[in-house]
Amino acid sequence: MFDFQKLEVYQKARLMHKKVMVYLMKCKTVPPRLRDQLSRASLSVMLLIAEGAGRFTKPDKKHFYIQSRASTFETVACLEACFDLKLLSEFELNEFNGEYEDISKMLFGLIG
């Protein structure tokens, strides 16, 4: 097992990427550019955590955790765009927001 796989924040980001992808598979009406951006942003959250965990110095790790947190914000913004287009319910948006807020806080702890 790799070090990043042991991180709770990585496991949560992986689960959330899966949830985003399931949503995108079910909702075929998400515009292609938004679909692509949402998919990439949610994947970036977990990939950047993995990449950061693989770095040796604290500043290197911090850089990737900061980038992962930025991708978390981007993912939430994409989900809000889906909500604005009435492609996501308020309940669904709030669920996603809560999970991504937890990820953001966990990343903030790794950055600190």
Image: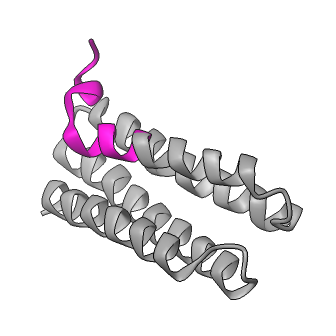
Q: Is residue 86 one of those drawn in magenta?
A: no
Viewer-proximal residue, 90 or 33?
90
Write the residue at 28% across / 17% down.
Answer: 2
Q: Farthest residue in the top direction?
A: 1
Q: Is residue 21 left or right of residue 46?
A: right
Where 2 sits versus 58, above or below? above
Quadrant in which the N terminus is drawn = top left
Percent position (x, y) of residue 12?
32, 45
For the residue pair 37 and 24, the one nearer the viewer reads as 24
Q: Main secondary structure of the magenta part?
A: helix
Coloring basis for residues: one colour
Residue 72 % position (x, y): 44, 64
88 vs 54: above or below:
below
Q: Position of residue 38 (x, y in %)?
A: 65, 60
Instruction: Give the magenta part as a residue range.
Output: 1-14
- Please state, as top left, top right, bottom left or bottom right, where the C terminus lies in the image: bottom left
Q: Which residue appears at 23% of the width and 51% of the height?
A: 59
For image coordinates 86% across by 65% down, the residue present is 29
Residue at (58% x, 57% y) in the render: 41
Q: What percent of the width, then of the height, locates residue 13?
A: 38, 46
